[in-house]
Image: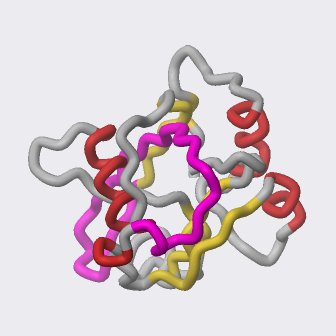
Amino acid sequence: MLDEDDRILLIRANDGEYRGSGIPVWLTPGGGLEGAETFEESALRELREEVGLEVTELGACVWTRRLPYALSDGIAREKHERYFVCRVPHFEVGAASPEFLDLEDVGGFRWWSVDEIVATADQVFVPRALGALLPAVLRGEYPAEPIKVGT
């Protein structure tokens, strides 16, 4: 979610990238697929659930990311993420539809500029190269195929 001032909305996940994974991280709204959802349908639902905003259309898928992990049960898993551009007017999280918000393990919401992300060495952002990846997207330079962004 990008606002008119070219800031990105990030959520602070207190428990890391996945439940119990470690240090807190700042990441984009999102979550897992439910049933036969497409990635796009899931992204729209997660925006409603996590930030309380009803969005009807997404922009380009600009990045993809795969992350292997295991929870405390020791079972190997892998996250498959897709990052879509979504331009919205600036809003305060929860003001649009507070009844939908799923705030479990959320340590806060914040609109970040690229400069703030790059200058903040004591926080972890997902993907890790967010500060380097974001300027091209803000300029509207979308790749023909989504870029694999790594961790």
* Coordinates of residue 74 in the picture (x, y in percent): 27, 74
- Residue stretch in magenta: 68-96
Relative to 112, residue 67 above or below = above
Q: Tell which of 17 and 135 is nearer to you.
A: 135
Relative to 69, residue 41 above or below = above
Q: Which residue is pictured at 63% across the width and 48% down the height?
A: 2
Give the color scheme: rainbow, by chain, secondary structure or one colour: secondary structure
* Coordinates of residue 88 in the picture (x, y in percent): 57, 47
Q: Tell which of 109 and 36 is nearer to you.
A: 109
Q: Is residue 90 magenta?
A: yes
Q: Which residue is pictured at 23% across the width and 37% down the height?
A: 38
* Coordinates of residue 19 in the picture (x, y in percent): 38, 78
Q: Which residue is pictured at 51% across the width and 76% down the height?
A: 13
Q: Quadrant of residue 142?
A: top right
Q: Residue furthest left?
A: 35
Q: Which residue is pictured at 37% across the width and 76% down the height?
A: 98
Q: Quadrant of residue 41?
A: top left
Relative to 31, residue 20 above or below = below
Relative to 151, residue 26 above or below = below
Q: Quadrant of residue 30?
A: bottom left
Q: Tell which of 61 and 58 is nearer to you.
A: 58
Give left or right: position of 123 versus 37.
right
Q: Tell which of 148 and 28 is nearer to you.
A: 28
Q: Is residue 127 magenta?
A: no
